[in-house]
Amino acid sequence: MKQRMFRFGEWTVDVAGNALSQGDVRIPLEPRAMDVLRYLCRHPGAVIPAEEILQACWGTAELGDNPIHKAIAQLRRALGDSSTEPRYIETVRKRGYRALADVVEEEEQAGIWQDGSPFRGLEAFEENHAAIFFGRMQATTRLRETVLDQVENGCAMALVLGPSGSGKTSLVRAGLLPQLTGGDGPVALSCLLHMDCADLGGGDLFGALAAVLVDAERDGVYLFDGSSAEALAGRLRSDPASVALRLGAVDSPVRIAVFVDRLEAIFRAPNTTAEDRARFIGVLDLLATHQVLVMLACRNDFYPELIALPELMALKARGGHFDLEPPDGADIAQMIRLPARAAGLTFEVDHTTGAALDDVLCDEARGVRMRCLCCSIA
């Protein structure tokens, strides 16, 4: 919820001013209480577990319930609400808390997605899905900081590591790259190129990279206009520095990004030798030192193969490796609820039990996550 103000029942919530107002009455709130109110109002009618609120508002679920109890008590005093006959915030025993009053946003975000289902299933999110990519805000922020640090240190490269299916591709394409597109910072991307190593088949690495780079452009001008992918592949093999110089832009923001996805495939590609892999990574490293953002994604079970490559070992030493952790309870809830909200959809409620479908999905997803964590520990 990015707006500075919204309505909650009869109250106007001033997010920036940490206050509630009704007519001439203005009641200040502590920042953490405002955080809790915003989070509950982000999911009106849904039962939000204490663990999820702690993770979303305090950044950890290890504090116990006392901080939430204090925040809820302050909110009820400010709202003139009652715990026994609630009109604004309900305590659902052994489950969590629920915002009861209507939430009306001054900057309405619901219904902004009108391009089919907001849920991708097993498909990765891409740049055009940024409006429905939720649940990875903290990971995206940390990855962005990692990338900017690498750019500042003169080698614009970062490697995202995680298990198969953990969302590495989505994090880069729908989370990171849209945030770095345009603007006026040290990274202001205008050209996004994508190479999927899993599509190599029997082709060679330089040919595949050339087929991507041949579409590179800056300010609407193709940088390799008139050159074929085959000719560019030859230059990558014989004179990669000339290609890097053409792509790079001295003393200006980083404009071009090359995302090399499923990097693990280069270690299993037929007709690809250890020397081919080393030279390929060397070319990518060269591009990164010429102000081309190079993003890599790889399964973490290939870590031994990765650190055998000097450039990637040096990247780790510079802090350029990013380990993608599993989503927590707050992340999972956002993944389920916010895409539906962006598409203007609502979840059904079982009129017999009163359980909302999104609550059921969140509870089940958390249960699966905890079982997976227990299995990994065992």
Image (spheres, rainbow, N blue to C red):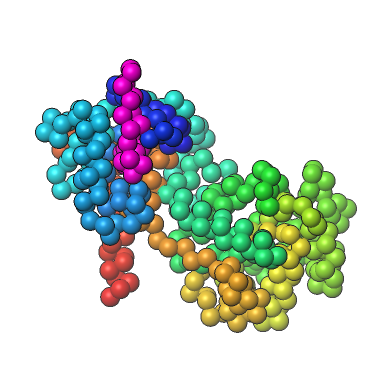
145 up-or-down from 347: above or below:
below
State whether residue 313 appears in this view. yes
27 up-or-down from 176: above or below:
above
State whether residue 270 appears in this view. no
Q: Residue furthest top?
A: 23
253 and 284: which is toward the camera: 253
173 and 77: which is toward the camera: 77
Task: Count numbered badges in the picture.
Answer: 0
251 up-or-down from 150: above or below:
above
Q: Which residues are magenta?
A: 19-41
- Relative placement, left or right, of 23 versus 286 is left
Residue 164 pos. (x, y %): 46, 65
281 and 143: which is toward the camera: 143
Residue 10 pos. (x, y %): 29, 21
Residue 142 pos. (x, y %): 51, 57
- Relative placement, left or right, of 335 versus 253 is left
Q: Residue furthest right?
A: 226
- State yes or no: residue 118 in magenta: no
- Relative placement, left or right, of 149 versus 71 is right
Tell me what residue is drawn at x 47 percent, y 63 percent. Answer: 324
Tell me what residue is drawn at x 63 percent, y 79 percent. Answer: 309
Res. 328 image quadrant: bottom left
- Relative placement, left or right, of 66 versus 185 is left
Q: Residue furthest left?
A: 84
Tell me what residue is drawn at x 33 percent, y 57 percent. Answer: 60
Residue 245 pos. (x, y %): 83, 62
